[in-house]
Image (cartoon, helix red, strand yellow):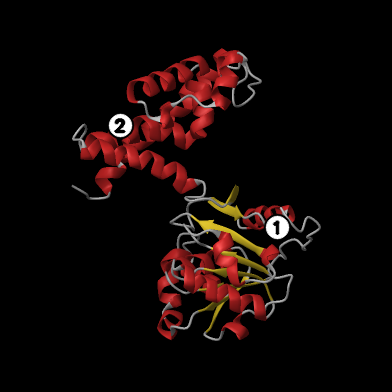
Amino acid sequence: MTETGFDIAPPPKGGRICVVGAGFMGCVIATLYAHHGYEVVLCDMQQDLLDSFAERARPIAATFTKEASEVEAMLGKVSTEADLKAAVQGAFLVHEAVQEVLETKQDVFGQLDEICPDNVVLASNTSSLLISDIAEKVTHKGRVLGIHYITPGHIIPVIEIIHSDFTPEGLVAWGRAFVESIEHVGVACPERPGFLINKIQFAMLTEIYRLVDEGLATRDDIDAAVRLSIGPRLALWGPLLTEDLIVSKKTALAVTDSLYKQTGDENYKGRPALRELAEAGHLGAMTGQGWYTFEGEYDETVEERDRQLSNLLEWLQDRDPVTRLKVR
């Protein structure tokens, strides 16, 4: 990273944030920031989007509180402004959430670079574009960062903090601190197609699309298989801790090698990181070391693992979420 001496003050509690773009995501982001005590200015050239903000944001605000007075107080912390130069005045952060068109984002960031002081962080909510491309027209690139919400952003607690080669380490740390201030969890990743979450998500979906195309499984069977096996485990522990808790690294490596031999698909080939753990005898919970280090006894770990999984599956079965969605 360049500009290693970059320094910026911590996110000021109750400070001003400008959100550029009053569409769905801009509405969510502005409401979330207001909920956490920030003063928000929502900017958009379309006056109808600004005029309808409160109506569209009220259901979002209601997910945080059932008190009507608190909802209105939250919405009252968001002002609207059509003029970009006026909207960014006094902001420590400008968060762009305009349409996912590169040229549009480049134009917005070019304008922001001209009108915002050098110490103002310029963030993008892009879900697919590279930060380096978005910042093409920016002179002071060291203050540009990706802060990407996962829909629905006011409920899903993870935010991707996307950085480029020109991003100072201090700005990534600043991004983590800011995300923590709104009670979300920041996951940092370098810019690349799909970033982190979509790269993982679409690796799975690509295989699922293939299963459907080849007629190997029905829609219902695929969803049931994931929802009642992979899904609960991933929800509780994530993929790497799940592997530690469920299967030996030797077995995991054997499965990947077997799939590779059967298909010739390089994506299945056992990766060096997994192979190194297996060869070192770090097999997971059973040996006390895998991707993670386990401090408790193995029997106790397994008992707690099974308790957590049973409770989650019981919760899912009691509520039958799929039926409640009224789909067929």
Q: Is residue 281 above or below residue 58?
A: above
Numbered disc 1: secondary structure:
helix
Residue drawn at x 66%, y 79% as measured from the top left: 114
Numbered disc 2: secondary structure:
helix
Residue 171's tag is 1
Q: Is residue 17 visible?
A: yes
Name which of mark 2 and mark 1 comes first in the sequence.
Answer: 1
Local crowd size for mark 2, using a 10 Å CA cut-off: few (<14), some (14–19), many (≥20): few
Residue drawn at x 46%, y 37% as measured from the top left: 235
Q: Depth check: 325 or 287 in front?
A: 287
Q: Is residue 118 left or right of residue 187?
A: right
Q: Is residue 52 left or right of residue 317?
A: right
User: Residue 14: x and y, percent?
Assistant: 68, 68
Distance CA(mark 2)–CA(mark 1) = 41 Å
Q: Is residue 325 above or below residue 255?
A: below
Q: Depth check: 228 or 45 in front?
A: 45
User: Residue 214: x and y, percent?
Assistant: 21, 35
Q: Write down the residue under mark 2.
A: 225
Number of marks present in the image shown = 2
Q: Is residue 68 visible?
A: no
User: Residue 275: x and y, percent?
Assistant: 55, 20
Q: Name the outermost residue toward the right.
A: 5
Quadrant for residue 15, please give it.
bottom right
Residue type, numbered disc 2: Ala
Residue type, numbered disc 1: Leu
Q: Depth check: 269 or 185 in front?
A: 269
Circle 2 or circle 1, nearest the eye: 1
